[in-house]
């Protein structure tokens, strides 16, 4: 006997992500999902954004890693509320994980929530987690071929941050190749070269996010 | 490798449907997935086999059908089926496109007792 099903396999995640979006909208909170390989510099970018924005905005951070709380401690030392999620080996976080993490913030009223996903260029691309902006951090030492090798991640993100830009000349990095590949898979993607060591590009990225936050509050 | 998490989602839906229709055993599950998704059918079958043990879907065969990427060119107005993730209009080379197919991921049907 054949039974017609026609149900989206990600239906429970999509439902939970949509519920989170409603909550964040009601509270006027802008949410960024930050993805990228282990060591790409996701935490450093978060730290620099916090330094630029913390005097003007109320910021909360969710840190996801397989194990430990190294990154959460870094963020906490900046005086920012943070929840560490440990996936215990899973390769991505889902909307349910974010929902659980939000319960750990008491009476929260954030303008901005930064969520650092598990370091991985494949799996997080399939799961929305209630975010407004999907950001992928790609670093210079990883090489200029990652967009071509992992197109889905770049196809599903709105913004690409190219980190460690200060070491570009030591790695024979072909910036034009990256931009051409981005044009091929996601012509609408915004690209921000930054260096968390020299501060290059951080102002521009902070301003972009700040504008987005105000856009959302006005909508 | 998130096929394990995807398998859990599939099992959840299959068990739910089995309960709804009072089915005793699921023999086959037909899945449709767009070319944009990076799902590897072999990995999915392997993961599903492990997590479905002892459930109504134990031993069920997973059949994955891939659907092509379809785009609508917003400049020349034509629709095309394109090669994997090369987002450019084959007619006028425009990148002003809307993806209208290829990102699907759903359970089409199941064969049951």
Image: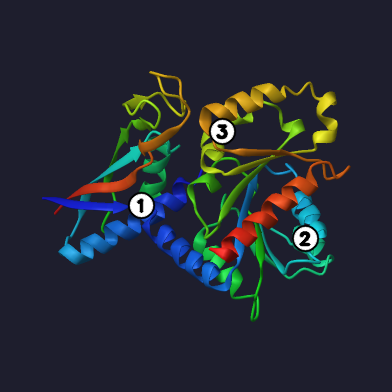
Q: Which residue is mark 3?
A: A150
Q: Please name the residue that numbered disc 2 is placed on.
A: A53
The relative height of residue B83 versus residue A206 in the rendered view (above or below) is: above
Residue A38, compared with residue A174, is above or below; it is below
Spatial CA span between label 2 and label 3: 31 Å
Q: Give neighbour class at mark 3: few <14, some 14-19, many 20+ (Cα, 10 Å).
A: few
Q: What label sits on residue A107 in the rendered view?
A: none
Marked residue chain, label 3: A
Percent across and percent down for residue B42 are 39, 36
The x, y position of residue A125, in whole percent, is: 52, 45
Mark 3 element type? loop
Q: Is residue A74 visible?
A: yes
Residue shown at the point (21%, 48%) measured from the top left: B109
Q: Chain of mark 1?
A: A
For marks 1 and 2, the one nearer the N-term is 1
Depth check: B66 or A56 in front? Answer: A56
- Residue at the far bottom: name it: A107
- The residue identified by callout 1 is A9
Give a yes or no on whether discs 1 and 2 share a subunit.
yes
Which residue occupies 58% across, 69% down? A28
Q: Could you tell me which secondary element the residue under label 1 belongs to?
A: loop
In this rendering, the label closer to the viewer, 2 or 3: 2
Asked if both marks, 1 and 3, belong to the same chain, the answer given is: yes
Q: Is residue A175 left or right of residue B63?
A: right
Compared to residue A163, the image places residue B113 above or below, namely below
């Amino acid at each position: 006997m054949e039974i017609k099903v026609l149900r989206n396999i990600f239906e429970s995640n999509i439902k939970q992500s949509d519920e989170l979006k409603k909550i964040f909208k009601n509270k006027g909170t802008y949410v960024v999902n930050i993805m990228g390989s282990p060591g790409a510099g996701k935490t450093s970018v978060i730290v620099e954004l916090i330094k630029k924005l913390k005097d003007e905005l109320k910021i909360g951070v969710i840190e996801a890693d397989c194990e430990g709380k190294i990154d959460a401690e870094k963020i906490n030392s900046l005086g920012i509320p943070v929840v560490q999620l440990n996936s215990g080996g899973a390769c991505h976080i889902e909307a349910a994980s974010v929902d659980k993490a939000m319960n750990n913030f008491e009476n929260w009223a954030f303008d901005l929530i930064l969520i650092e996903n598990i370091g991985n260029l494949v799996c997080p691309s399939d799961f929305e987690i209630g975010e407004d902006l999907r950001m992928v951090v790609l670093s210079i030492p990883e090489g200029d071929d990652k967009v071509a090798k992992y197109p889905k991640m770049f196809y599903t993100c709105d913004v690409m941050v190219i980190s460690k830009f200060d070491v570009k000349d030591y790695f024979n990095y072909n910036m034009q190749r990256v931009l051409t590949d981005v044009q091929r898979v996601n012509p609408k993607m915004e690209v921000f070269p930054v260096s968390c060591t020299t501060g290059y590009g951080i102002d521009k990225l902070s301003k972009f996010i700040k504008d987005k936050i105000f856009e959302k509050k006005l909508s | 490798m998130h096929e394990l998490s995807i398998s859990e989602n599939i099992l959840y839906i299959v068990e739910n449907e089995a309960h709804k229709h009072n089915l005793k055993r699921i023999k086959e599950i037909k899945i449709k997935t767009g070319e944009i998704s990076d799902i590897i059918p072999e990995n999915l079958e392997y993961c599903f086999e492990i997590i479905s043990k002892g459930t109504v879907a134990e031993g069920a065969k997973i059949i994955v059908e891939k659907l092509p990427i379809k785009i609508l060119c917003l400049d020349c107005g034509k629709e095309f089926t394109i090669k994997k993730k090369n987002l450019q209009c084959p007619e006028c080379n425009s990148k002003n496109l809307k993806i209208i197919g290829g990102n699907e991921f759903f359970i089409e049907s199941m064969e049951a007792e």
